[in-house]
Image (tube, rainbow, N blue to C red):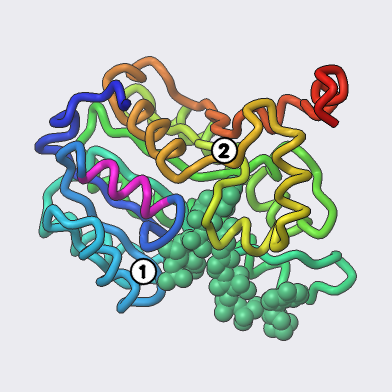
């Protein structure tokens, strides 16, 4: 049962880059349920259109590649014309694949950095004068790769680490009228990300055993964290990265299974 009021975001506007599937779509759906007018974007215009229909509540589906500043700014201007100044902006577009650095071309590495890190700069820089400030809330979707080095993930680790620092710098530069935070999801079920990173049931089971909460998260779990960060309850929270990961990053909880006689 959610603790949030049904009309929490009535009259508010949200722009969600990469909000056309997975975790970010879950956030978009939740913000719209709570009354926000929501615009989502991704590269595939048809997918964005379908996402808007899924979100309902008059949501807008737009097409852009966050690597392209001008196109992304154009999408934001379109959303601004339709809905007015943004109270909430989420930067969640990302790309990932498993590969050792020696199997990555320079273009493979820079493609992920360009989508995740440069894309987040483009989204945040591009929306700055379209915000309803003071009071606007910006959220970057980062990942545990930002702080935990992971083999086969040099591109994503570098990109997400950069995002965490970008969040902190923009919090300093854009306070007091704009709050800038990150959410770092743990493994989230039924997402493209986990299809790529843990494709088989055995890997998933091994992951789950290590998590304090003993399960993968849901898009709804992450959406509730986004709702908190965008609400007045978080009015003194900026420059932080909120882990929504069931304790994944704290450490390995599987030893407790041995102690409990479960493993
Ligand atoms: P997803 O379903 O693949 O979502 C990615 C979104 O970004 C889609 O809307 C996609 O639409 C869009 N996108 C990709 N490249 C883009 C580009 N160049 N320009 C504009 N839009 C682009 O992924 P997900 O697994 O839900 O992950 C969502 C976010 O959570 C990512 O930031 C990811 O790093 C983070 N995260 C995920 C997990 C997890 O368990 N899945 C864990 C930690 C962090 P198009 O394909 O149409 O462009
Ligand atoms: N191993 C090594 N290199 C890979 C690779 C892999 N598994 N997948 C892609 N690449 C390389 C390509 O070969 C190319 O390099 P090259 O030009 O030197 O050959 C480079 O990465 C870019 O690939 P391309 O397919 O042209 O990029 P794109 O912009 O069309 O797609 C990706 C971006 C590669 C990140 C793609 O996986 C994607 O669109 N991802 C979005 C969805 C996603 O990843 N969701 C999970 C989010 S956590």
Residue 26 shown in magenta: yes
* Residue 50 or residue 37, whichever sits in front: 50
The reply, left or right, for residue 33 in relation to residue 244 is: left
Q: Residue at x 33, y 64 (%)?
A: 41
Lateral position of residue 87 relative to residue 70, left or right: left
Give the residue drawn at x 85%, y 22%.
261
Question: Label 1 belongs to which residue?
Answer: 70
Identify which residue, 1 or 68, lies in the foreground.
1
Q: Which residues are magenta?
A: 24-32
In the rendering, at what x and y percent does residue 236 appear? 38, 15
Rounded to the nearest angstrom, the CA distance separating label 2 from label 1 is: 27 Å
| Element type at mark 1 | helix
> For the residue carrying disc 1, how many other residues have a C-alpha within 10 Å: few (<14), some (14-19), or many (20+)?
some
Residue 202 falls in image quadrant: bottom right
The magenta stretch spans residue 79: no
Q: Position of residue 106 (x, y in %)?
A: 76, 73
Residue 193 screen position, x and y as percent? 59, 58
Image quadrant in which the C terminus is located: top right
**Residue lying at 36% horizontally and 45% vertically, measured from the top left:** 27
Residue positioned most to the front: 261
Query: Could you say which quadrant of the image residue 225 lies in?
Result: top left
Quadrant into which the N terminus falls: top left
Mark on residue 134? Answer: none
Disc 2: which residue: 184
Mark 2, ligand 1, within 8 Å: the answer is yes
Q: Main secondary structure of the magenta part?
A: helix
Q: Is residue 117 visible?
A: no
């Amino acid at each position: 049962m959610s603790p949030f009021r049904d009309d929490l975001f009535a009259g508010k506007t949200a722009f969600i880059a990469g909000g056309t599937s997975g975790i970010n779509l879950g956030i978009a759906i939740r913000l719209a349920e709570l009354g926000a007018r929501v615009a989502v974007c991704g590269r595939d215009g048809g997918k964005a259109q379908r996402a808007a229909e899924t979100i309902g509540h008059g949501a807008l589906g737009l097409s852009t590649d966050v690597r392209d500043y001008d196109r992304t700014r154009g999408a934001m201007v379109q959303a601004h014309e339709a809905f007015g100044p943004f109270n909430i902006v989420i930067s969640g577009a990302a790309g990932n694949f498993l590969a050792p650095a020696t199997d990555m071309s320079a273009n493979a590495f820079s493609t992920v950095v360009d989508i995740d890190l440069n894309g987040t700069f483009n989204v945040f820089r591009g929306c700055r004068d379209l915000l309803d400030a003071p009071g606007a809330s910006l959220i970057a979707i980062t990942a545990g790769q930002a702080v935990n080095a992971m083999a086969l993930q040099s591109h994503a680790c570098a990109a997400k680490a950069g995002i965490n620092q970008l969040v902190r710098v923009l919090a300093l530069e854009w306070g007091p009228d704009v709050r800038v935070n990150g959410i770092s999801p743990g493994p989230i079920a039924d997402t493209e990300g986990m299809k790529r990173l843990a494709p088989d049931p055995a890997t998933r089971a091994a992951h789950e055993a290590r998590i304090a909460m003993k399960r993968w998260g849901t898009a709804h779990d992450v959406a509730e964290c986004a709702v908190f960060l965008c609400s007045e309850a978080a009015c003194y929270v900026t420059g932080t990265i909120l882990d929504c990961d069931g304790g994944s990053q704290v450490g390995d909880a599987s030893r407790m299974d041995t102690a409990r006689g479960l493993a």
